[in-house]
Image (cartoon, grey):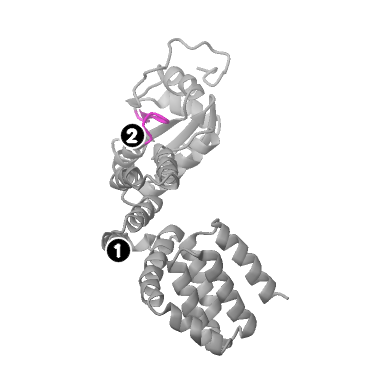
Amino acid sequence: MDTILDPNRPNPAATGGADIIKDGDAKSFMQDVVQASREVPVLVDFWATWCGPCKQLTPALERAVTAAQGRVRLVKIDIDQNRGLVQQLSQMGLPLQSVPTVVAFWQGQIADLFQGALPESELKKFIETLLKAAGGQMPAADLLAEAKQATEEGDHQTALEIYAAVAQQEPENAEALAGLARTLMAMGEEERALQVLEAVPEKLRSHAEVAGVRSALELAAEGRKARERLAEFENRLAADPDDHEARIELAVALNAMEKRAEAAEALLEAIKRDRAWNEEAARKQLLKFFEAWGPMDPATVKARRGLSTLLFR
């Protein structure tokens, strides 16, 4: 077996249609791992029957690999039943003295590895990183891209169904949860959107996408109230251009009317006139707009440049 990683060794059988998850041994290692990794990344789970952490890791690893829908494969190898293989791989520098050890192969070579029982969230990140290195991505990423495209085309129902499917499959996918809430909001279902956000796991609530939707919902509620007093704010500013409270409320109303550029300009004017007023209320309101709009929104990009000019002039 001294040619175990020889890239010139012929493939004894095609790997197409092979099982995504299977048990391996010394005889099948070349075909199931090295040769198969020329098509898709292959994870090798080195485990043992006496290993407690292995019993935690393997089921989680199987779920993560299954979620990848064939874009990555898993081969499980019992080290006690394959001592010769383990010895040879150890001589090549692989740390197989302790288990569990998971080694990733791509293009016939070792791409990455980890030891110990990682939580499922870390397993997912490990696989995502491996797929990116191989020029691919997880199926959920493809679905989220489809949902965003549907949103841009105004097909909110399709976007809603995709986000819901991903969120059901991956309950801790912050982008899917945020997308689901934002789509419900776009469909006028703000109460349901809020229910989605309230159900988001605590550790995900500070995620930029989730926080952005929450800010958008808050701004929508504030904006409805402000719109009813739009004429009042305009009249107050006409009478006193330094009525900063009226200018900020006007910005909130304009944002609710989807006039983002005008809303940002109103706040920038307030900052220009008196940045420190009410503990920098105008700047804080503008940052809340940025959070709700998203960092790449044209209004955010333009207003951030304007804010930078004011703060660093």
- Name above or below for residue 127 compared with residue 269: above
Which mark is in front, 2 or 1?
A: 1
Mark 2 residue element: helix
Residue depicted at x 33% and y 25%: 23
Residue depicted at x 65% and y 65%: 305
Q: Earlier in the sequence, mark 2 or mark 1?
A: 2
Q: Which mark is residue 66?
A: 2
**Horizontal and vertical percent position of residue 246:** 49, 84
Within 10 angstroms of label 1, few (less than 14), some, or many (20 or more) residues? some
Within 10 angstroms of label 2, few (less than 14), some, or many (20 or more) residues? some
- Name above or below for residue 269 compared with residue 138: below
Left-right relation of 216 to 310: left
Q: Is residue 79 magenta?
A: yes
Q: Mark 1 highlights which residue?
A: 194
Left-right relation of 43 to 166: right
Q: Which one is nearer the viewer's eye here, 231 or 302? A: 231
Mark 1 residue element: helix
Q: Is residue 23 magenta?
A: no
Q: Residue 257 lies in what quarter of the image?
A: bottom left
Left-right relation of 168 to 294: left
Q: Which one is nearer the viewer's eye here, 222 or 166? A: 222
**Horizontal and vertical percent position of residue 123:** 40, 44
Question: Which stretch did the figure color magenta?
Answer: 68-80
**Horizontal and vertical percent position of residue 278:** 52, 88
Q: Which one is nearer the viewer's eye here, 222 or 59? A: 222
- Name above or below for residue 23 compared with residue 296: above
